[in-house]
């Protein structure tokens, strides 16, 4: 079955997803670069979200080449 590190890994990300859900990150239909990476960072931070970590990511405006 699952080994302990795999189980802890799954629990870590589940707690991060719960934190992102509590912050209503999944409600909007339009996902920008900044919003998508903030959601990913929140999930990756896992339980640290409940100890004051609030990851926010900004993306540069990429202009198409002419």
Image (cartoon, grey):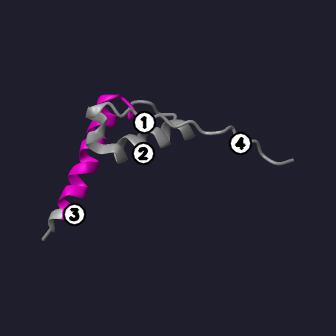
Determine contact: label 4, label 2, CB under 8 Å. no
Q: Which residue is mark 1?
A: 55
Drawn side of residue 62 relative to residue 41, left or right = right
Q: Which mark is residue 40?
A: 2
Label 3 and label 1: CA atoms lie apart by: 24 Å
Q: Secondary structure at mark 4?
A: loop
- Mark 1 or mark 2, whichever is nearer to me: 1
Residue nearer the viewer, 40 or 28: 40
Label 2 and label 3: CA atoms lie apart by: 19 Å
Image quadrant assignment for residue 45: top left
Image quadrant assignment for residue 2: bottom left
Residue nearer the viewer, 21 or 55: 55
Q: Which residue is mark 4?
A: 62
Question: Could you tell me which quadrant the N terminus lies in?
Answer: bottom left
Say if 15 sits above or below 21 in the image: below
Q: Earlier in the sequence, mark 2 or mark 3?
A: 3
- Mark 3 or mark 4, whichever is nearer to me: 3
Residue 7 place in picture, x, y as percent: 18, 59
Q: Earlier in the sequence, mark 1 or mark 2?
A: 2
Q: Earlier in the sequence, mark 3 or mark 4?
A: 3
**Extent of the magenta region:** 5-26
Q: Which mark is residue 6?
A: 3
Label 1 and label 4: CA atoms lie apart by: 22 Å
Q: Earlier in the sequence, mark 3 or mark 1?
A: 3
At horizontal 66% and vertical 39% (from top left) the residue drawn is 60
Residue 63 place in picture, x, y as percent: 76, 42
């Amino acid at each position: 079955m699952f080994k302990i590190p795999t189980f802890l890994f799954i629990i870590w990300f589940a707690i991060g997803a719960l934190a992102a859900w509590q912050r209503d990150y999944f409600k909007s239909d339009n996902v920008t670069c900044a919003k998508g990476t903030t959601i990913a960072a929140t999930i990756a931070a896992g339980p640290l979200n409940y100890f004051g970590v609030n990851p926010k990511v900004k993306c540069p405006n990429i202009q198409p080449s002419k």
